[in-house]
Amino acid sequence: MKTQMMHVEHAPGRVLVGPKKLRNGYVRIVSQKDGSGRIEKFDFTSRAWFQAPESVTFSEVWSAPSVPGLPCSDIVEKS
C-alpha cells in the first residue's frame, strides 16, 4: 500500500490553528518565517491580532474549543 501526503506551504502569516475561544477572548497560531509558530490574541478594541502574552501556551490553544460560524467581518487581519 502506498500513502501520499499533500505538502501544505507554511508561508509566514498563515493561520495554522484557530481562531479558538480561550478565557475571555480569541487566540490563534500563525506561522513565522523560520517555520515556528506564534500565538496571537484578538484585541476587541482595535479589532486586530497581536502577539499573545507568554502566559498563553500552545497546549491551551490546541485544546481550546473552535469558534463555530464566526463571521469573517467580526475578526479582521492586523493592518
Image: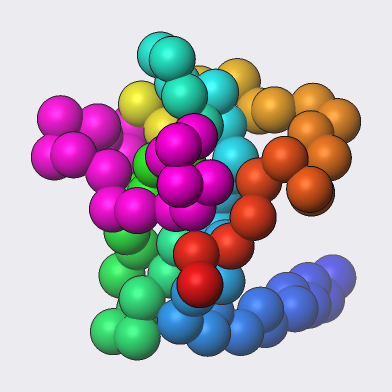
Where does the magenta region start and end? 43-59
Q: Nearer the viewer, residue 8 or 64?
A: 64
Seen at 43% across and 70% down, the residue is 31
Determine whether 70 is above or below 33 in the image.
Answer: above
In this picture the colour scheme is: rainbow
The location of residue 62, given as percent across then percent down, is 46, 34
Q: Nearer the viewer, residue 30 or 44?
A: 44
Location of residue 54 (image quadrant): top left
**Can residue 28 be seen at all in this image of the molecule?**
no
Seen at 53% across and 46% down, the residue is 47
Residue 74 located left or right of residue 59: right
Residue 59 located left or right of residue 63: left
Determine whether 22 is above or below 34 in the image.
Answer: above
Which image quadrant: the N terminus? bottom right
Extreme residue toward the top, this view: 23
Extreme residue toward the front, this view: 45
